[in-house]
Amino acid sequence: MTAMPPGAGYARELREHWRYWLGAACGLSVGIATQSYSNNLFAPHMIAEFGWSRATFALQGTLSVAMFFIVPVIGRLTDLFGSRTIASVGVIGLPLAYLAFSLQDGSMPMFFALSIFKMLIGATTASIVYSRVVALQFTVARGLALAICASAPAAFMIAFVPVLGVLIEEHGWRNGYRVLAIVALVIGLFAVAIIPGEARREADAETQRAPVRRTAKGDYGTIFQDRTFWIVMAGMFLCNAPNVLVASQFGLLLVEQKISVATVPWFISLYGASVVVGRFACGIALDRFAPYRVAALSMAMPAIGFILMAAEFNDLWLVAVAVVFIGLAQGAEGDLVAYLAAHYFSRALYGSVAGLISAGLALSSALGAAMLSGVLHLADSFLPFLQIMACTTLLGAGLFLLLRGRSKGLAFDGATLEADGSLA
C-alpha cells in the first residue's frame, strides 16, 4: 500500500464520507444531546413562575434512570436496523415533546412525566445512534470525525442559546419551547435524509469471514466477560455522576456563584465553546496517542472546575475558568464513549456496547441527581456536592489507566455490516 503523507488520510476520509459526518452532526445538533443547554435556559423561568423549589426540581435528574433501561435497547436495535431507521423516531417525537412542555400548567408530576417521555423518545437521537454511522465508516480519521459530530450540538447551541435566551426573555419560555420544536424538526429531517442508507460498507480485515447468525444472549455474554468493558463502564460511571449539574442545574449553580440571570446564557455559551474545543482536542489526541492516557487526562479536568466553584471566591473570571474546565471534559466525554467502543470492541457489537455504557451513564446521572437533591435539601447549597464530585471524578479518571496494554478484547464473529451500521 502506498504511504500517504500525514493528514492525507484525514482529508480523504472526510471528503469521501462527508454525508455520514454531516448527517450525524446535524442530527446530534437538534437531538437529546442539546437538552443540557436548553434545560438551563428554561429552568430559572419555570421555577420562578411555578414556585418550585430547587431541591424538588433537582429530582428531574433522577428520571434519567429510565435511560438505564431504554438505551441498551436502542443500541441493540441500531445494530439490527441501522441508524437512519432508529433516528427517524426521535426526529418526529422530540419536537412533539417540546410542544408538550410549552403547554405545562405547573404540575410537577406532569413535568416529570414529560421529562421521561422526552428522554425515552430522545434516546433515538443520541450519540449511540448517530455516532455509529461515523465510527464504522472511518478508520484513519475516526477520532476527528467523531469530534466533528460530537461537537456539533455545542457549536449549534453557542449561536442558538443567546438567540433563544432573548426570545424567552421577550416572548416567554412557552414560545421558546415552540421555536425549539420547529428548529429540531427541520434540521432533524435534513439529517435523516442526507445519511446514506443503501451502500454496503467496504470489507476490511474484520469482515472477511462468512456471515453468521447473531443472538443477543451470545453477544451480551461476550461483552460481560470482557474486563475492558467493566473498566470503561466503571470509569465513565464515576466521572459522569456530576452530569446533573450541566444537564439541568448549571444555570442555578451559576446564579449561586453570583452570576446574574441575564448573564447566565453567555456563560452557557462559554461552556458550549469549551465543549467544542474539548471534543476536537480529545478527538485529535485519540488519533495520535494511547486512548487510556487521553481518557484519564480528559476525565480528570472537571475536578479543577468543581474545586474552583467550591472555593466560593465568587469571582467572575474564576467562575469562567471553572466553566471552561467542566466544558472541556464534557466535550471529551462525547468522543470517548464512541471511540472506546469502536477501539476496544468488535464493530459488530458497537451499538450494544455503547448502549450498555450509556445505560451506566444514565444510572450514574440519576444517582448523582438524587445525591444533589439531598444535599440541597440539607444544606441549600451546591458546595458539598461540588466537593464530593471532585473526588469521584478523579477516582473515575484514574481507572482508565488500567486500560494500559489492553487491545481489542471482543472477537469479531463474522457478521457483515451495512454502510449505515445495520447488520446484514
Image (cartoon, helix red, strand yellow):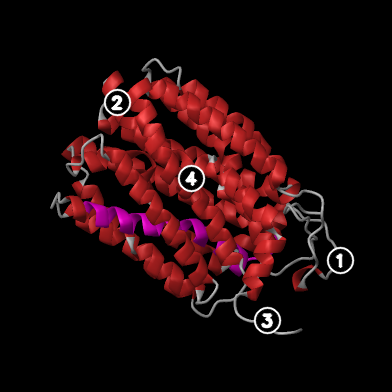
Q: Secondary structure at mark 3?
A: loop
Spatial distance from mark 4 to mark 3, Cα to Cα? 34 Å
The answer to whether residue 250 shows anywhere in this view is: yes
Pointer 1 with pointer 3, Cβ within 8 A: no
Spatial distance from mark 2 to mark 1, Cα to Cα? 58 Å
Residue of label 2 = 47
Residue of label 1 = 210
122 relative position to 273: left or right: right
Predominant SS of the magenta segment? helix
Spatial distance from mark 4 to mark 1, Cα to Cα? 42 Å
Residue type highlighted by circle 2: Ile
Residue 182, placed above or below residue 289: above
What residue is at 54 percent from the left and 40 percent from the top? 30
Check disc 3: other Cα within 10 Å, few if <14, some if 14-19, many if 20+: few
Residue of label 3 = 4
**Magenta-drawn stretch contains 305:** no
Q: Earlier in the sequence, mark 4 or mark 3?
A: 3
Spatial distance from mark 1 to mark 3, Cα to Cα? 31 Å
**Magenta-drawn stretch contains 324:** yes
Q: Secondary structure at mark 2?
A: helix
Q: How many marks?
A: 4
Residue 409, placed above or below residue 35: below
